[in-house]
Image: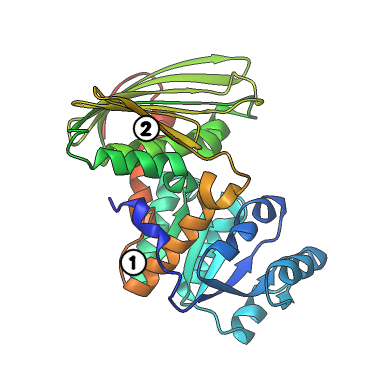
Amino acid sequence: MAIAAESQKGTDMEPLRIGFLGAGGFARHTIYPALHLAPVALQAVCDADENRAKDAAGKFGTGRYYTDRHEMFEKEDLEAVIISMGPDPRQPLVLETLAAGYHVFTPKPPAPSLEETIALAEAAEKHDKTLMVNFQRRFSLGVREARRIMQTESFGTLTQLFCSFCSGKYPTVKSYLLDFAIHHFDLARHIAGADVKELSVFHNEVDGQGAFAVGVEYTNGVVGSLQLSSQRLWQRNYDYIEITGQHEYIVLDGLWGAQHFTESGNSFTSNFSDQRNGELTGDGISLTEFVNAIREGREPVSSIQDCVGTMRFYDAVLQRKKGVISL
């Protein structure tokens, strides 16, 4: 897997000309505010709601807006399109946009199912276009710092990985796994640096909410576990990760920093600034990686091809809630 810490370059390159499909609340809270942190030029916005499209275009871009995506594609000189909406309505739009000749950037999850994720990967390959999924936690300050430490000689070989990702209530167990826990299926693979070889899943469901204990062996020999639940409160920080090497270990208690424990002394890196997208959740760095990959002609971190592995992990937990599963 590529290294996310390399994704911050690109400030001197020509901005990528993009169009944006979707101007809802989620997009306006996450991706739109991060655009100024990446080498992109927002040419136009399209949304079925004309007022939302006009407002987003005026606030974040050139002011040009559309309610018909085909008109935007025809009139605007675009290189790439950001498509921000739920996975079900987004799926056919991503396929259409790739076929129209544009690179695409989307939020997670990649698609509503593993099968549809594979279809997206095949379409991106067929049309020779980049499709990147915004698993922004890969680019968060804490994860980037952990990845840097893990590459040092003193850390040694990664041996064990523990991830805890719990939330409040979700409508269904499936929606919890696909919308929320998907972040840690992805992070576990990213930090381990390998796909899942074998896993064992135990599941407890009470009043429609799920709790999962997942034991994992990765293809590179790393072992670990995931604690996943939708039976907690929403009013707290949910990411907790322990990364154990031969000689040192790292604790990520949230995305805001890394606690590094060594025999010679401990160090703590943190940033509690209000620059949400740039340094904490990683949206701005993720967008920059998207541009860098296109300009450099390489596969990006969190490409659709890589995210097939994340969806295989998700699907195995969803489909086989108990017993040992080989992937």
Q: Nearer the viewer, residue 247 or 118?
A: 247
Query: Residue placed at 63% from the left, 24% from the top?
Result: 168
Q: Position of residue 292 (x, y in %)?
A: 39, 67
User: Which residue lies under the disc numbered 2?
Assistant: 316
Helix, strand or loop at label 1? It is helix
Chain-order first, disc 2 or disc 1:
1
Q: Position of residue 241 (x, y in %)?
A: 40, 28
Q: Amino acid at mark 1?
A: Glu
Helix, strand or loop at label 2? It is helix
Q: CA distance from mark 2 to mark 1?
A: 25 Å
Q: How many marks?
A: 2
Residue 22, placed above or below residue 79: above
Q: Position of residue 233 (x, y in %)?
A: 64, 21
Q: Nearer the viewer, residue 179 or 32?
A: 32
Q: Which mark is residue 19?
A: none
User: Which residue lies under the disc numbered 1?
Assistant: 125
Asked whether, in this view, residue 199 is left or right of residue 67, the answer is left
Mark yes or no: residue 102 visible: yes
- Tell me if mark 2 has few (under 14), some (14-19) or many (20+) residues whose alpha carbon lies within 10 angstroms of its own: some
Mark yes or no: residue 243 visible: no
In this view, the residue farthest toward the front is 264
Task: Kindly indicate whether the residue at mark 1 contacts the one at mark 2 (C-beta within 8 angstroms).
Answer: no
Asked whether, in this view, residue 37 is left or right of residue 233, the answer is left
Query: Residue placed at 17% from the left, 33% from the top?
Result: 156
Query: Residue placed at 39% from the left, 56% from the top?
Result: 304
Quadrant position of the C terminus in the picture? top left
Q: Nearer the viewer, residue 122 or 223?
A: 223
Classify residue 251 by image quadrant: top left
Query: Residue placed at 18% from the left, 26% from the top?
Result: 246
How was this image coloured? rainbow
Classify residue 194 by image quadrant: top left
